[in-house]
Image: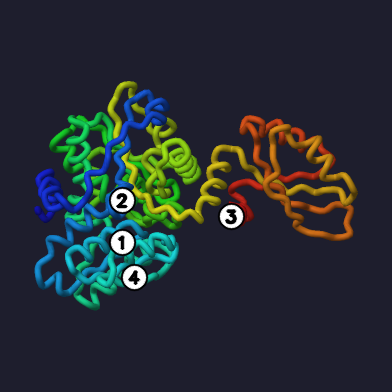
Amino acid sequence: MTTDTLTAADVEAAAERLAGVVDQTPLQLNARLSALSGARVYLKREDLQPVRSFKLRGAYNLISQLSDSERAAGVVCASAGNHGQGVAYACHALGIRGQIFVPSTTPRQKRDRMLALGGDMVDLVVVGDTYDDAATAAAARVAATGATLVPAFDDLRTMAGQGTLAIEVVEQLGHAPDVLVVGVGGGGLLAGCVSWLGERHPGTRVVGVEPAGAACLGAALAAGELVDLPEIDTFVDGAAVRRAGAHTYPIVKESGAELISVPEGRICSEMLALYQVDGVIAEPAGALASSALGRFVHVQPGQDVVVVVSGGNNDVSRYSEIVERALVYEGRKHYFLVNFPQEPGALRRFLDEVLGPDDDITLFEYVKRSNRETGPALVGVELGDPGELDALLDRMAHSPMGVEKVEADSPFYRFLV
């Protein structure tokens, strides 16, 4: 492999190493997204890899190229969960010791999967609150032990392995897609795909999709240099990266690939649609790319569009939060502080005179009880029709009860969602 850039030949060499190791995951025509966009939309089901994401491609490609002395020293990686599973799988398959550093926000389900895949060849270390905290700890361990660092995205060997997905898509489709849409954390998959497609099929439009709460690559492109995000939302844990890669950034910048960001609530809505309509269980990062179609990424009718679904490691305990975020994003769920008169029938009047016929109370909790004439309550309302919000607010304004809407930018809101 070249030392200063990533070439199509590097990606093709990686494909040869991965033959028989990674699965050729299905490329499935999706009726829901095709109807939404007017194009022929295919899902590239990387959630069906042995580790449920494309991360196995990059991890195995790097680790399989280590020298005997490097193998003896072992490997170390930092991961939000999916890359760690790829490293664990590779360590077990190649008989190499590995240490995986993960932040405390990594779901328990992903931690358990890493240990199951790696068996007695890997150790798991939980440190910090973000991927970047884990990356700092992993780098310190490498410096202290001489082990080889296996980056989740910022290494040409990792990127080459991840870019093999593009080769597979073209082989399965029979030609290059008009549009390829991929999720973006640190940019490894995007960099690998644009490197191969840019040389072999330059007519393909490539779009990278970041979570709005952790859009580090977009921030770097806007600034013209790598930057650290001051804060990140770790909800999309598989793509919650504070700083893009020193190697991925210039490759993506030079490629001219499009980059957009999508609100976390929209990602939640897409997760539910994938599950309820398409029968696909995706984690937040897995629904990242497909969440952008229609509202954020527009394609032409009749085009062949491939969307990567990667990340099927969702913890069932997260679904209550996923549903909540989706309802709030769609404008169906709202919270209010209501001052109820301390008299019989006050709640009944609120139900009859303020709520619409299709609205539902999903939360009712007195905030404070006292001997005063009114008592405040926190009320959650789910609207039957998001378009009826203005009418509800108007009825509240004309009600004798004092009502205050809890806005999404209020510090108090963080305790609700």
Sort mark 4 into few (<14), some (14-19) or many (20+) by Cα contacts within 10 Å: some
Q: Between marks 3 and 2, how big is the CA–CA gap?
A: 30 Å
Q: Between marks 2 and 4, how big is the CA–CA gap?
A: 19 Å
Residue appearing at x 28%, y 68% in the figure: 119
Amino acid type at circle 4 is Leu
Q: Quadrant of residue 179?
A: top left
> In the displayed structure, would residue 127 be above or below residue 166?
below
* Label 4 or label 1, whichever comes before in sequence order: 1
In the image, is 339 to the left or to the right of 164? right
Identify the residue under disc 2.
53
Identify the residue under disc 4.
124
> In the displayed structure, would residue 228 be above or below residue 386?
below
Identify the residue under disc 3.
414
In the image, is 352 to the left or to the right of 233? right
Q: Tags 1 and 2 in contact by the CB under 8 Å rule? A: no
Query: Residue 84 shows which numbered tag?
Result: 1
Q: Tags 4 and 1 in contact by the CB under 8 Å rule? A: yes
Q: Quadrant of residue 405?
A: top right
